[in-house]
Image (cartoon, helix red, strand yellow):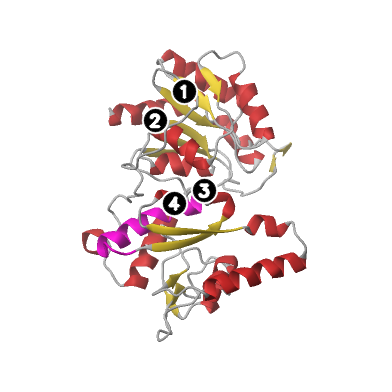
């Protein structure tokens, strides 16, 4: 999810250079809401990549062949792989350009791709520094592919524009607080990214002391049970019903700010320009961290193993699902950072 959100500033750059430019965006169906948020996207092409993983090899082959026919029926001025992995490279290779144009498939060169071998799918290969943040890498690749200069004479110091802050989000039937509220996102794809439940409960108390209510979204039944435990006994906190991504984004857009662990919703909150604190421990935000005009990252400290990128924490005499490096981050630390960001925006 975060990878998709981080593509959006590149599209904003491109349409500023070419105001009539339109994109079709091929994306995993699980996250097909996100491309439609940007005005430069003409059509979203949802592919059931995750569902294919659980199907037979023959069903997978049938699905790929179906998409091969679909992509061959379309013609594009350029086909650009902003991800640089094997899956995205395969679909880049299947897509078709204008009849007389050969060099229309663009991507990273051998030294720049995320996954070895992906560069073989591209006819035009571009060198992009791997030490850049992912947002800047994709802005750079798209500008090289379509031959335009980035803002401020090619400078990447200009704050990325996700194209979301002026968007009109749909009305919601969700029962939201009547007063200013914050969105807390404690759920992550790995349990090892999670902050302790008691820290979240302490943070809800701090928010209430500063006259903020809290809402908690969730996506799976396990996540639902977790947020219910966190909200239990806290009158200023409420668990949202299950929402789709556009609905969650609408909630975030109406909020006063957010606190998240390393998860896709952190990227959405940051992209919306909301005061956002993202808590990092086993993962490193340097190259892919949630980024936005009012976002900040708080990182665990005191462990030589950071970042470990392990789904199970193994340190000292502990082995289990709770990252011990995150224990040292207090609710007071997070609140201080969030409060500062809220004050700066008001």
Task: Identify the image quadrant of the C terminus.
Answer: top left
Quarter of the rendering containing residue 222: top right
- In this view, the mark in front (2 or 3): 2
Q: Which residue is mark 2?
A: 254
Earlier residue among tags 3 and 4: 4
Earlier residue among tags 4 and 1: 4
**Separation of disc 2 and disc 4 at Cα?**
19 Å
Q: Which residue is mark 1?
A: 176
Q: Which residue is mark 3?
A: 284
Q: Position of residue 134 (x, y in %)?
A: 44, 57
The reply, left or right, for residue 302 in relation to residue 24 is right
Query: Can residue 155 be seen here?
Result: no
- In this view, the mark in front (1 or 3): 1
Q: Which residues are magenta?
A: 2-21
Helix, strand or loop under label 3: loop
Q: Main secondary structure of the magenta part?
A: helix
Is the residue under label 4 in contact with that under label 3 (CB below 8 Å)?
A: no
């Amino acid at each position: 999810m975060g990878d998709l959100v981080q593509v959006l500033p590149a599209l904003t750059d491109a349409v500023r250079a070419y105001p009539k430019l339109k994109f079709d965006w091929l994306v995993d169906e699980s996250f097909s809401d996100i491309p439609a948020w940007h005005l430069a996207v003409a059509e979203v092409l949802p592919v059931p990549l995750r569902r294919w993983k659980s199907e037979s090899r023959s069903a997978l082959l049938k699905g790929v062949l179906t998409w091969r026919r679909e992509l061959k029926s379309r013609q594009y001025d350029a086909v650009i792989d902003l991800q640089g992995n094997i899956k995205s490279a395969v679909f880049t290779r299947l897509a078709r350009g204008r009849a007389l144009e050969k060099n229309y498939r663009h991507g990273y060169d051998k030294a720049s791709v995320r996954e070895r071998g992906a560069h073989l799918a591209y006819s035009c290969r571009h060198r992009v520094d791997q030490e850049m943040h992912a947002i800047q890498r994709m802005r750079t690749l798209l500008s090289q592919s379509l031959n335009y200069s980035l803002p401020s004479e090619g400078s990447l110091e200009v704050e990325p524009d996700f194209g979301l802050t002026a968007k009109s989000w749909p009305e919601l039937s969700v029962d939201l607080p009547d007063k200013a509220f914050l969105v807390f996102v404690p759920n992550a794809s790995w349990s090892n990214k999670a902050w302790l439940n008691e820290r979240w409960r302490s943070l809800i108390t701090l928010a209430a002391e500063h006259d903020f209510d809290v809402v908690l979204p969730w996506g799976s039944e396990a996540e639902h049970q977790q947020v219910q435990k966190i909200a239990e006994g806290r009158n200023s906190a409420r668990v949202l019903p299950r929402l789709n991504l556009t609905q969650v984004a609408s909630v975030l857009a109406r909020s006063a700010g957010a606190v998240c662990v390393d998860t896709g919703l952190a990227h959405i909150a940051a992209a919306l320009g909301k005061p956002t604190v993202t808590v990092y421990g086993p993962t490193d935000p340097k190259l892919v961290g949630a980024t936005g005009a009012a976002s900040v990252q708080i990182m665990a400290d005191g462990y030589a193993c950071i970042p470990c990128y392990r789904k199970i924490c193994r340190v000292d005499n502990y082995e289990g699902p709770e990252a011990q490096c995150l224990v040292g981050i207090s609710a007071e630390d997070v609140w201080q950072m969030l409060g500062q960001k809220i004050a700066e925006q008001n």
